[in-house]
Image: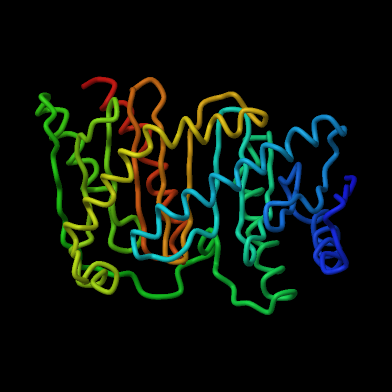
Amino acid sequence: MRTTRSPFAHIGHEKLIALCKEELPGLPGIEVLAFYDCGFHVFTIAESDDEERQALERAFRQLITEFVRFDGLVRDFGTGELMRVVVQSDAAAVHCGHVFEEEYLIGMTRDLALVEEMDEAVSHLVTRIRKEIYLQADQLPGGRRGPRETPGLESAVLKTVAGEATDSDLVTDLLTFLGATVDVNDLHYVAVYREWRFICSADVIDSPALAPWFGGAEGTEGARKLYQDFATRLRSDLPELAYSLRQLSEEPIRRLVLDVVSGAIYAYPLPNSRGFAVGVTVFQPEVFVAENRLREGIDRIADLLGAG
């Protein structure tokens, strides 16, 4: 892979570039790696020709703009700043990681079989840069990938909410499935929408174990409203995000992960069902596990919506 420096690369970036070049051969999945500082492109490591590389660098710059915009939105949840965004379409996936003070590392793959490897590899690089160059703590982007180190939580208080859908059988079936999908140990909230209209949700955020996150003045009802407001915004946010990444892929977005300091928000547009699902965890170590739990239920949610 070839390293291309921009005129904005300076001596302070040399150690960072050397670290990425040293690590990259041993990390699977990363087809393109690029770094930006205060909005300026610093370097790219890729096999692409110059024209394609420059097009990708422009798309990545737009992604950083979207990152900053989403960061402003997720701060309302009280779970910290945005530190990792993953966007996946039917043609490609990209990870934008916040390294330190307006600095971003972006990785991309077009091999959908290597998306998880690419995502984990970029998280690994972000962590190494933070710890070894900036002497910062590991924020655990993407959560743990190994076994849980603490005992599982057993008690949970399930709350289900139905919208104004006319198909009561659909809502009943969805709530039964969502109620079995949420878990106090990882996936704390799931909501389903069709044609941008709220259908129903299930969550365990009333559980005592989650009181440090939801026991404040706004309470759990305030949190549910914030999640619904966020999902409503996706009607404009997802098309804007897709448009900003059109030079990377013109395929519809199938997955969006907004990984914050404490947990993550997931948005999954559902193919052939005119809907989407939103999931939330507030446990940072469980970000990976919680998304897998949601992902395992997406096909069933899509089937229920499509039949309802």
> Relative to residue 174, is residue 152 drawn left or right?
right
> Relative to residue 187, is residue 254 drawn left or right?
right
Q: Residue at x 83, y 43 (%)?
A: 46
> Relative to residue 182, is residue 234 drawn left or right?
right
> Relative to residue 64, is residue 169 drawn left or right?
left
Whether residue 136 is situated above or below residue 227 in the rendered picture: below
From the top left corner, tell me how far across and down residue 274 is, in percent: 33, 23
Seen from the viewer's position, the closer of residues 126 and 231 is 231
Q: Residue at x 69, y 39 (%)?
A: 109
Q: Quadrant of residue 133?
A: bottom right
Q: Residue at x 33, y 70 (%)?
A: 152
From the top left corner, tell me how far across and down residue 29 is, in percent: 71, 45
Q: Residue at x 55, y 32 (%)?
A: 89
From the top left corner, tell me how far across and down residue 42 is, in percent: 79, 53
Q: Quadrant of the C terminus?
A: top left
Q: Quadrant of residue 14?
A: bottom right
Q: Quadrant of residue 172?
A: top left
Q: Residue furthest bottom?
A: 135
